[in-house]
Amino acid sequence: MKPENSVFFISKSEKAAAYVREKLLFSRAADKFVHIGYENCYETVKTHCPQVIFYDIRFNQSEFFDFLKKVKSTPRLDSSSVILIFEKIDEELLCNAFESGISDFLTFAATDAEFTIRVLWAFRKKGSIQAAKKKTQILSNLNILDKKTGIYTKNYTYTILKEESKKSAGTLAVAAPDVSSRAKLTPEILAKTAKKCLRKTDILGFSGDFKLYIWFPDTAAGTAVKILRKIERNLPDDVSISAGIYQSSSFEQMEENANKALSAALLQENAFIIYSQIKPEKSEENPDSYKNFKSFKQKFLKKYESEVSPVFYRTQKIIEEKLFETTVNQKIDENESVFSLKNAGCESDFRITYPGYATINIDMTHKTGLEILRSRANFSLKELDGDRIGAVLDDFIKEFQFLSKSAV
């Protein structure tokens, strides 16, 4: 048997099998028709990898969805088309089957041409899937696509989404797990769940370990929120995500404002915020434009603390449960903010300063006993938000964990 052009019919009825066989008009030597029963049907299908699977739903509704789930999770069967056959269409069952991943459906009353065309479409589909696999493999080898999830890597996401935004109007969403959920959710699970819930035309990529950019072409912001809610519903029960959404003609403006909306959403937790719904803040110009410099300083520090303090506090709560035999300390005052980690292998400081109230400097130091490693990141006041600081802090903690293990 040549599995690439084989058709399996799953049913307990020999009469139905003969009927469907006669419906199919092709007669090439490579086109094989096989009838099997419901018992152990998945194991048989997995062994032979048929291109088309007709499933007679009349006698075995209860086990069909389990069968379909197994087929969809088997890489060898990813190009197989599952076509449901009804005596009379059950709309609720059909909708549930569509959501679960069937390729098509028919009734036994369909014409010979309808049956044959469904099969020929499935044969054609295999060629398209194989071509797409080759392209995906090339992009993965070039590190444009992430090998584990198949979505764009953080080095290419911005460029690709920016180019796509030039082709049509749309909405950008920036999504991330809430801080309290990051220890329970891997980037891989988040990305795969999002990918499964998005439409074929939507584009997904990483913009950090836990941050996703999603481009919704020709889509209003409100519709994007509905799709994000679907992603949330498909995540594990004990985790939550937040997202910032913005719609504009300029991708740079969309990215900036969507990230601002994400920062506001993460402070609320489990929130999807469209940027236009955020109440505008009063502009804080250069301090020289204020009659009272002390007043400006107080306003600035209040905003700064509202962004940094929640990130430090939540992160400490999370890592204290993960990093054993590690001392965690933090401090925030009007001169600097420090997040410190110390164990037998490494002593590290994450120090934030704001000289002249114009630039935010983040100095990271790791002392292992053998060497001292230093690095710096900085933001302008305009870029100041908890999400950006949280991303840099996450990388700092990963470096600390790596150096601690290396020093032992």
Image (cartoon, helix red, strand yellow):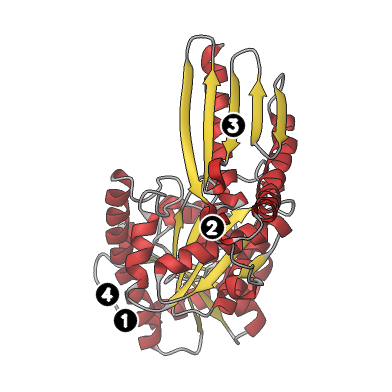
Residue type at the position of mark 1: Leu
Mark 3 or mark 2: name the one nearer the start of the chain.
Answer: 2
Rendered residue at 56%/25% (across/down): 400
Location of residue 359 in the rendering, given as x and y in whole percent from the top left corner: 51, 46
Badge 2 marks a residue whose secondary structure is: loop
Residue marked by disc 4:
27
Q: Badge 3 local density, few (<14 within 10 Å), some, or many (20+)? A: many
Residue marked by disc 2:
286
Residue marked by disc 3:
350
Q: Nearer the viewer, residue 142 or 167?
A: 167
Mark 2 or mark 4: name the one nearer the start of the chain.
Answer: 4
Mark 1 or mark 2: name the one nearer the start of the chain.
Answer: 1
Residue type at the position of mark 3: Phe
Q: Pointer 1 and pointer 4: residues touching (CB < 8 Å)?
A: yes
Residue 182: name its quadrant: top right
Residue 368 in view in this figure = yes
Mark 4 or mark 3: name the one nearer the start of the chain.
Answer: 4
Q: In 3D space, how far apart are the residues under numbered discs 1 and 2 (Cα atoms)?
A: 78 Å
Location of residue 262 in the rendering, given as x and y in whole percent from the top left corner: 60, 60
Q: Pointer 2 and pointer 4: residues touching (CB < 8 Å)?
A: no
Mark 1 or mark 3: name the one nearer the start of the chain.
Answer: 1
**Position of 129 compared to 361: left or right?**
left
Residue marked by disc 1:
25
Badge 1 marks a residue whose secondary structure is: loop
Location of residue 245 in the rendering, given as x and y in whole percent from the top left corner: 56, 69
Rendered residue at 49%/9% (across/down): 370
**Position of 365 compared to 90: left or right?**
left
Rendered residue at 59%/75% (across/down): 276
> Considering only vertical position in the picture, is 407 above or below 307?
above
Badge 4 marks a residue whose secondary structure is: loop
Q: Nearer the viewer, residue 266 or 44?
A: 266
Q: In 3D space, how far apart are the residues under numbered discs 4 and 3 (Cα atoms)?
A: 71 Å
